[in-house]
Every structure is written in structure tokens, then in C-alpha cells.
Image (cartoon, rainbow, N blue to C red):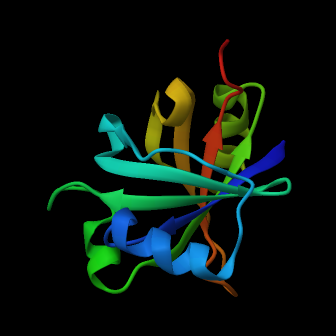
Amino acid sequence: MKLHHIGIVVSKISESFPEITKYIKFDEITIPSLIASQKVNVCFLKIGEIKLELIEPIGDDSPVTNFAQKGGGFHHLCFEVPNIRKQLDEFVNNGARVIVEPVKGFEDRLTAFVLFNMVHTKMNLIELAEPRKL
């Protein structure tokens, strides 16, 4: 398992992008793309080995709309795993709850979201993604 990106919810990528790039020079920036299964647009900003994912809701029924309306911010960590179903089983056996079953996500990867019951932190949402198919 390796960290792929840090997800950050924003109201509008087009408005957030100039703000963050004013302070940080990124090595690579992707064009925003639609992730229909999650009802969001995403844009990846890479600096060194770290990627930030800006996540913009694309309608009132997007799973991140309420979060964006409350100001957005840190949303999740995404880990790349070789076998998403095997990793989900392990997490569930340890008490986690799958809130988004595996679907086609960013870069056409198989992705899923898991909620952990962590008492001492709000950092409890993890995205899993299988390696990119070439």
C-alpha cells in the first residue's frame, strides 16, 4: 500500500487553483476531469512525490456538495493497493465500513471509499485505488 494523493474539497477548482498556485509551484498539473461515478470534477497537483487532488462537486446531489458549502478542506487520503477487494475485506474485518463500493474512478482506476471508526481524529475517510491499467 502506498500513498497516492491527498483529497481536498473545494467549491470551484477554477477559483481555488489560482489561490494555491500563488503559494506553491507544482511540478505537474492535470486538466480538471469529470468522475461521473462520484459526481465530481478533479484536478491533480503534483509536487515532488506528493499529489493533491482538488475535488469540486458537480451538482446538489454530489457526495461532497455539503462539505464544499461548509468551506471544504481536507477530505481523504488515497492509497494505491494491488487488490482493492482483498484490502476492503481486511479493513471490514477490522471494523471499517465501505461507503462507496468499487467503481470506476480517477484515471479509469477501480476505486472505493472506506470509513474508519477512529475516536481521536476526524481523519477517517480513506480512498483505495488499484494501479492504473495501461
Examine the image and state in which quarter residue 51 appears: bottom right
Q: Name the residue at 43% across, 44% down.
A: 100
Q: Quadrant of the C terminus?
A: top right
- Residue 101: x and y in percent read 45, 36
Q: Name the residue at 66% across, 30% down.
A: 84
- Answer left or right for 77 relative to 105: right
Residue occupying the far left of the picture: 60
Examine the image and state in which quarter residue 1 appears: top right
- Residue 128: x and y in percent read 64, 42
Q: Name the residue at 47% across, 44% down.
A: 31
> Can residue 97 be seen by looking at this rendering?
no
Picture mark count:
0
- Answer left or right for 109 relative to 56: right
Report the front residue among 57 and 26: 26
Whether residue 17 is situated above or below residue 53 in the rendered picture: below
Whether residue 109 is situated above or below residue 40 in the rendered picture: above
Report the front residue among 42 and 69: 42
Report the front residue among 91 and 2: 2
- Residue 67: x and y in percent read 34, 75
> Can residue 11 be seen by looking at this rendering?
yes
- Residue 29: x and y in percent read 60, 51
Whether residue 19 is situated above or below residue 38 in the rendered picture: below
Residue occupying the far top of the picture: 134
Q: Name the residue at 74% across, 39% down.
A: 80
